Amino acid sequence: MTYKTTLELTLDELHMLDKYVDYCEETKEFFDKLKNAYPKPKSPVEEAYKDWCGEYPTGGPSEDAKWGAFLAGYQVTQPKAVPVEEPQSKSMDEVVERLVKKYQAQKLYNILKDKCGFSKDACNEIVDTVEEWLPEPQSAEGSQNVNTELLVDGFNHCLQKMKEMLR
């Protein structure tokens, strides 16, 4: 019994197969026919020409004056490519230093000192007061409820993060 199978492969996939498959002449002819069965992709300028004239160009620009004129006009109207500067590579130390500064800028002590202009003594006093004000960690010891344990874990995690962000 013969099974009918169909393969839907892109041209790139066929090229990849060409690299890895060792095949005989008959198979090579089959792949060539398969490649030719797929329509050749049209360039954007050919698509624009079809939209304008109703058909794809039939020859090269030198053979078809209408196509040559259209091609020249199309190329003039296309935006020029602006060269993109590649970002400069930074050393690992610079990256780490930048991230540490960014992290330190989020600390309450540093915000009070740098942005608000408080003295070191005043910053220490405010941060100490906030530390005292924060509640104590909770315990879910003895709880039979999973939700209660998860809520307490979340509360304690949040409390720990707040304490870390003070200094």
Image (tube, helix red, strand yellow):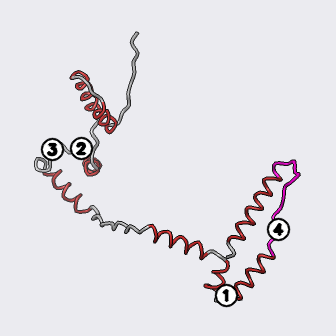
Q: Is residue 113 above or below residue 92?
A: below
Residue 35 locus on image (x, y percent): 27, 32
Which of discs 1 and 3 lies nearer the camera? The answer is: 1
Amino acid under disc 4: Glu
The quarter of the picture where the N terminus appears is top left
Magenta region's main secondary structure? Answer: loop
- Vertical comparison of 35 with 83: above or below: above
Q: Which kind of residue does numbered mark 3 sit on?
A: Gly
Gap between marks 2 and 4 measured at Cα: 77 Å
Which of labels 3 and 4 is toward the front? 4
Which residue is painted at 53% across and 70% down in the image? Answer: 99
Residue 50 in percent (x, y) is at 27, 47
What residue appears at the point 47 percent right and 69 percent down from the top-left corner?
Answer: 95
Name the residue that disc number 4 marks: 136
- Label 1 vs label 2, nearer the camera: 1
Q: Specify which label sits upstream in the sequence, 1 or 3.
A: 3
Q: Which residue is mark 1?
A: 120
Query: Dot 4 surroundings within 10 Å: few (below 14), some, or many (20 or more)?
Result: few
Residue at left 67%, top 72%? 165
In terms of depth relative to the viewer, which is nearer, 130 or 61? 130
Please tell me whether residue 110 is drawn above or below residue 42 in the rendered image: below
Cα distance in 3D space between marks 4 and 1 = 26 Å
Label 3 crowding class (10 Å Cα cut-off): few <14, some 14-19, many 20+?
few
C-alpha distance separating marks 1 and 2: 76 Å
Snapshot quadrant of residue 82 = bottom left
Dot 3 falls on a residue whose secondary structure is loop
Dot 3 or dot 4: first in sequence order is: 3
Q: Residue furthest top?
A: 1
Residue topped by disc 2: 56
Name the residue type under label 2: Tyr
Which residue lies under the disc numbered 3? 59
**Label 1: few (<14), some or many (≥20) within 10 Å?**
few
